[in-house]
Image: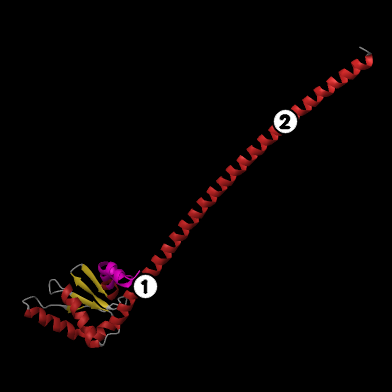
Amino acid sequence: MSLEKIIERITQDSLAQANEIIGQAKQQATAIIAKARAAAASQAKNRLEQAQREADNLAQREKAIAQLELRKKMLAAKQELISATYNNIAEKITRLPDKEYIVFIKTQIMNAVETGKEQIIFSPEDAGRVGNKLIQEINQELKSKKQPGELTMGPQSKQLGRGFLLLQGPVVLNYSLDSILARLREETELKTAEILFKEQ
């Protein structure tokens, strides 16, 4: 075999081998690229799903916070309305005509008296409006029920609003209008709320 043919054959064999190596390299590169793309796509999908989960969780938290804020605001508004209702009651009582107001005070005193010997303290406004005459009237009524009718009117208290204080020895019972309504509110607030908000 001539030298030219040997060189040609070696060249062809080398070329075929090189082409085979190049082909294998291309296949490997294609496989690596495909694998990398699949991994990237999987990572992107995972990240997208994680981002979606985080967004959903954030949305749920924001919704829960908004609902809590709404409930707090609604509760505050209801409490404000309930307070306004009791304030309105207090205002209506203080604006009663004298005759009706005296009946109200008399009822409170009659319910509060235990011994019939207590001292009653009014504010200057109520002392002038109710007067000592009411104490005498209550004493007469107590005596007719076979109880000591020895109530006395004590010194006026400028700190006291509407209503009265009842002194039983060292014990002072507060029957100011504010205290009466505070006790009334404790007893009736749930029922008042039911009435005010029954449509909701």
Spot occupied by residue 123 in the image (x, y as percentages of width and height):
28, 79
SS at mark 2? helix
Q: Nearer the viewer, residue 144 or 51?
A: 51
Q: Quadrant of the C terminus?
A: bottom left
Say whether residue 9 is magenta: no
Spot occupied by residue 20 in the image (x, y as percentages of width and height):
78, 25
**Res. 13 mark:** none
Spot occupied by residue 152 in the image (x, y as percentages of width and height):
17, 78
User: Residue tagged by mark 2?
Assistant: 27
- Quarter of the image where one finds residue 91: bottom left
| Residue at the spot 43% in from the left edge and 65% down from the top edge | 73
User: Residue tagged by mark 1?
Assistant: 81
Q: What are the residue bounds of the magenta stretch?
A: 181-200
Looking at the image, the residue that sits furthest to the front is 1
Q: Quadrant of the N terminus?
A: top right
Q: Residues within 10 Å of mark 1 (few under 14, many from 20)?
A: some
Q: Nearer the viewer, residue 156 or 50?
A: 50
Compared across the picture, whether 133 is left or right of 123 comes to left
Q: Nearer the viewer, residue 116 or 27?
A: 27
Q: Amino acid at mark 1?
A: Leu
Spot occupied by residue 79 in the image (x, y as percentages of width and height):
36, 68
SS at mark 1? helix
Say whether residue 199 is magenta: yes
